[in-house]
Image: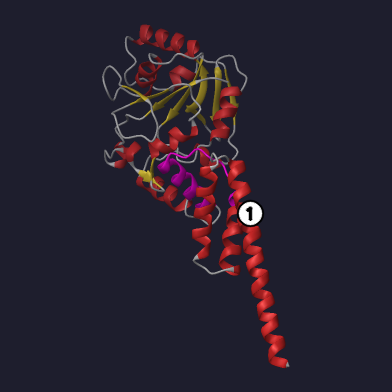
Amino acid sequence: MTYDAIVIAGGRARRLGGADKPALTIGGRSLLDRTLAACANAARTVVVGPRRPTYRHVVWTREERPGGGPLAAIDAGLREVKEDTVLVLSGDLPFLRAETVRRLTAAPGQDGAIVNDGRDQPLLGAYRTESLRRELALLATEHGRLDNLPLRLLTAELTLSRITTATPPEALDCDTWEDIAAARARIREHGHVLDEWISAVKAELGIDLDVDTDELLDLARDAAHGVARPAAPLTTFLVGYAAAQRGGSPEEVAAAARKAAVLAARWAAEAAEGSEDAGNAGTE
């Protein structure tokens, strides 16, 4: 489904001592960039907050009175939205995945869908654009303002579906220094560090390519064992370069990796034969 995205990145971060929270890094990437990566398929992404460097193009806007809270921020973002569906995210979701975004934007519901992993998270949801505009207009009329009104006033009047994330950390936001430290520790855990590093490198280099990392790791292992340890990084580099020369698709990467793996196997076989011949000569 085609959608626009609003990312709210202009809070005061009082619990972080006023630090520029969206610019804080987790695994070498800013919280804002990590959130933006999850909604990279949005037709248009609007970030509400002060301008900062981002790894991809976004539309910047501010509330009429900066720091006016989430309802004022959503209202400001909606002025830049063109699609019928809008994804609304806080800018501090380091583990949000594109798969959850797809589920949200495709979920049934009269007015939209939000994540509920033990609690409703309105800043992790997809909505019908006109539903949000309608309710914000009614709230502004009723209260005479949107500044500093609680977010629950908006969602209380909407008919929403609720989904859970595939992995609980996806819904975790970073409000305190303890949250930041826990997020930084999590990505370095054995089961996460490689995927996190690859994602960071691809974002830094501007590469949008999904490859079979297990196949490349197997190739690196074979080159290291069958040839020499320095052959592992050099071989994988050459595989990438060769694939890029042929268009750079995942299929080209896989084909180059298979060719190099066969070559590494031949080297290993020759080395084994050489050892066997030397052993036989020593017994003659």
Q: Which residues are magenta?
A: 192-214
The quadrant of the image that shows the N terminus is top right
User: Is any atom of residue 116 visible in this view?
Assistant: no
Nearer to us in this view, 209 or 126? 209
Nearer to us in this view, 84 or 213? 213
Is 149 magenta? The answer is no
The quadrant of the image that shows the C terminus is bottom right
Q: Residue drawn 38% across and 47% down?
A: 28
The answer to whether residue 277 is left or right of residue 18 is right
**Quadrant hosting residue 72:** top left
User: Label 1: how many residues lie within 10 Å, few (<14), some (14-19) or many (20+)?
Assistant: few
Report x, y in % for residue 279.
Answer: 69, 86
Residue underneath mark 1: 259
Is 194 magenta? The answer is yes
Q: Is residue 180 above or below residue 53?
A: below
- Three-letter code for the amino acid on which mark 1 is drawn: Lys
The answer to whether residue 237 is left or right of residue 29 is right
Report x, y in % for residue 154.
Answer: 45, 17
Q: Residue drawn 54% across and 39% down?
A: 247
How would you classify the magenta stretch by its main secondary structure?
helix
